[in-house]
Amino acid sequence: MIPKNKRQTTLLLLAGTVASLLFQTTTMGAVIFTESFGTVTGTTVIATHETANGFDNDGFTFLGTGDIRNATPSDKYIGASGEANAYLTSTGTPTIVISGISTIGYTAGTVGISFGAYKSAIASTMSTLLLAYSTDATNWTPITTLAEPTGTGTSIWRSISIQNTNIPISSTLSLRWKNENLDTTYYRIDDVVLTALPEPSIAVLSALGLLGFLRRRR
């Protein structure tokens, strides 16, 4: 039989472990995926880069009317990978789409996204760079982004981060960046990171129930 003081110590250690795990589960976002667009030696069609498994996530599908380039590599923000980036030209309405993403097992309303972005025009607020999601790759829902600074020195790479978005829990999620081209600005995209809070695990909930039971037995 375990002495009373040892049982109490064991319970305290268990309580601390469960509390720490619960805190991490409910307050710290987990990374669902990252994408740095790989490397290229020059301007490369998205479909060609996809066929060559040039993207980081071979299990996803990449498509669109933009292209992948190695000019003006990403910098200026923490985590900038440099190398290749997605280029959305200032003519037409070029896009890049990432499909096949799953957010199953994560908590609705906690999905966040960040990415590196470059604008060519200092007068642009980047309002013509449209980010959207879809669960069928056909019907698109906008993801709200804030206006970026304008003026001298703003034609640079920066990290854009949007937390607690309307991105849903889905096994067929797609993300799309589109240059609406209402002005003459071109954009570059790099270092996409999708995060979310995991759903509370059954193990954590069970452990909490056990702790409650043991506390009532004291």
Image (cartoon, rainbow, N blue to C red):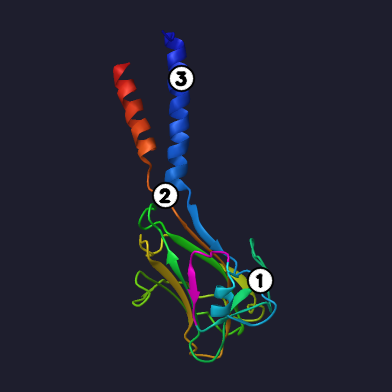
Please say if 57 is above or below 218. Answer: below
Percent x, y for residue 162?
A: 47, 64
Please say if 173 is above or below 125. Answer: above
Percent x, y for residue 187?
A: 57, 80
The image quadrant of residue 56 is bottom right
Residue 100 appears in the figure:
yes
Residue placed under numbered mark 3 in the picture: 10
Q: Is residue 5 left or right of residue 35?
A: left
Badges 1 and 3: C-beta atoms under 8 Å apart?
no
- Residue type beneath disc 3: Thr
Is residue 60 covered in magenta? yes
| Nearer to us in this view, 38 or 157 | 38
Circle 1 crowding by C-alpha within 10 Å: few under 14, some 14–19, many from 20: some
Is residue 204 covered in magenta? no
Residue placed under numbered mark 1 in the picture: 39
Quarter of the picture containing the N terminus is top left
Mark 2 secondary-structure assignment? loop
Specify start and end residues of the magenta stretch as a single range: 56-64
Label number found at residue 198: 2
